[in-house]
Amino acid sequence: MPVSTTLGLFRPAGGGGGGGGGGGSGGGGGGSAAAMHLLCHALLAAGAAAKLNLRAGGASFPAAMYQDVSFAYSFRKPASASADISYHSVGSSAGKRWIKDGTQRCEDDVRPCVTLDWAASDSLLTESDYAAQPDLQMFPTLAGAVVPIFNLPNHTEGEGQDLLLTPTLVSKIFRGAVTRWDHPEIVSINPLLALPAERILLCVRADGSGTTEIFKKALSAFEQEFKEQVGADSGTRWGLANVTRRRLNSGVATYVAHTPYSLGYSVLAEAESAGLPFAALLKGDHRVRASPTSVAYALAELGLEIGNEREVLTADVHNALGLMAWPICGYTYLVMRTNPLPAEV
C-alpha cells in the first residue's frame, strides 16, 4: 500500500488558521520545509564525507515513514557517498532524552544508548527544555491520527458494522468511568452490534509516548473530568488499577490483537498494519473514521499556520470540531540541535 495510506500521515501544507499549545503555536508546511532543508544538508554532507553514520531515534508514530525514507536513500545516494542512516523506534520520551543528554540518562531504556544526530517526537519539548538547551528546535514533518483499537470476538468489519463511540465516551472509558462493553452508553449508539457482557480490558503505553500525549490531550479536551483526573501529559500515569501496559505502539497493538474484549490506542498506521479494527466517532449525528482525509480536515481547521517567524514551530491539532475532521490528531516532529554538527560523528 502507499505509505500515505498505511500511515495516515502526510506532509502538512501552508495556509489556514493556527492552533497553539505546549511550546508554542504554528506548524505546517514551512516547518516541514525547514526540516527537510536540514535533512538535505545532512545527506549532502554524507556525500562529501569519507564515511558518515547518521543516527536517529525516537517516536514510534512515524517510524515506518522514516525507516522507508532511509532505506530509499540507500539506493539514491551519490556513488561517492559512504553513509549509513539508521532510525531507532524507542518512543518520543527516549528520543528527546537521547538528543538532549546523549548517553548520560538512558539507564531506563531497553536498548543501549547512542548519540543521535536528530530525534523524532510527537510530544513537545517544555519551556524548561528550551531554557536549558536553547539550540534545540522542533520541526513538524508529518501529521496523523491516533485511534481506539479493539478486539471483540465475532466482530466483522463492513457497512454499518463500525464500533461507534462518542469523544466523551472514549474519555470516560480511559478514566475508568465506563468499564463494560454492554454499558448503556455504548449499546445505545451501536444497535446493530451484539456487544458482550464483558469487562473492557484496557491497554496503554508503558513508556513515555508522544502517541499518548496526543491521545490524552484530545481526551482532556473532550471531557473536563478526564483532564482533572488523568491529565494531558505524555507520561504513564492513568489513575487506573486494572490496566495493562506495553512498550511502543506495536506493543499495545500486539496485546489488543491477542486479547479478546481489549481496547487500546495506537496510530492509524499500526492499526492498519496489524489488521486491527478501530472505532469510529460519533460527532452529533455524523460518524467519522480516521483517514488521511479526516486528518486533512482537522489540519485545515486547526493546524496550517506556518509559523516561519516564530521561535517554536509546534501546534496542537486535536479536538477539531468539523463533522468531517478526526479529532484525535497530532503532528510529529524532528528534534534537532541548531548548532553545527561536530567534525566527527
Image (spheres, rainbow, N blue to C red):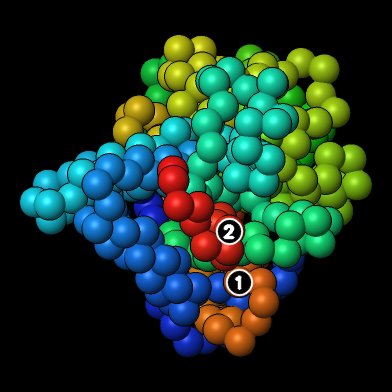
Residue 19 lies, with reference to residue 91, above or below; the image says below
Other-residue count near label 1 (Cα within 10 Å), few / some / many at <14 / 14–19 / ≥20: many
Residue corresponding to mark 1: 313
Q: Quick one: 15 or 203, which is closer to the camera?
A: 15
Left or right for 145, reference 37: right
Q: Quick one: 279 or 198, which is closer to the camera?
A: 279
Q: Quick one: 287 or 269, which is closer to the camera?
A: 269
* Residue 149 visible to the viewer: no
Upstream in sequence: badge 1 or badge 2: 1
Residue 298: x percent and y percent? 52, 68
Residue at the image point whose x is 85% and y is 28% from the top: 239
Residue 16 lies, with reference to residue 24, above or below; the image says below
Residue at the image point whose x is 45% and y is 19% from the top: 254
Residue 115: x percent and y percent? 53, 37
Residue at the limit of the structure toward the right, as seen here: 228
Image quadrant in which you'd find residue 292: bottom left
Residue 218: x percent and y percent? 68, 54
Q: Quick one: 41 or 205, which is closer to the camera?
A: 41
At label 2, which amino acid type do we have?
Arg
**Which of the numbered marks, if any, corresponds to residue 294?**
none
Residue at the image point whose x is 44% and y is 46% from the top: 344
Residue 225: x percent and y percent? 87, 47
Q: Are marks 1 and 2 in contact (CB under 8 Å)?
A: no
Rendered-image quadrant of the C terminus: top left
Image quadrant in which you'd find residue 308: bottom right
Secondary structure of residue under mark 1: loop
Residue at the limit of the structure toward the left, as seen here: 79
Residue corresponding to mark 2: 337
Q: CA distance from mark 1 to mark 2?
A: 14 Å
Mark 1 vs mark 2: give the one in front: 2
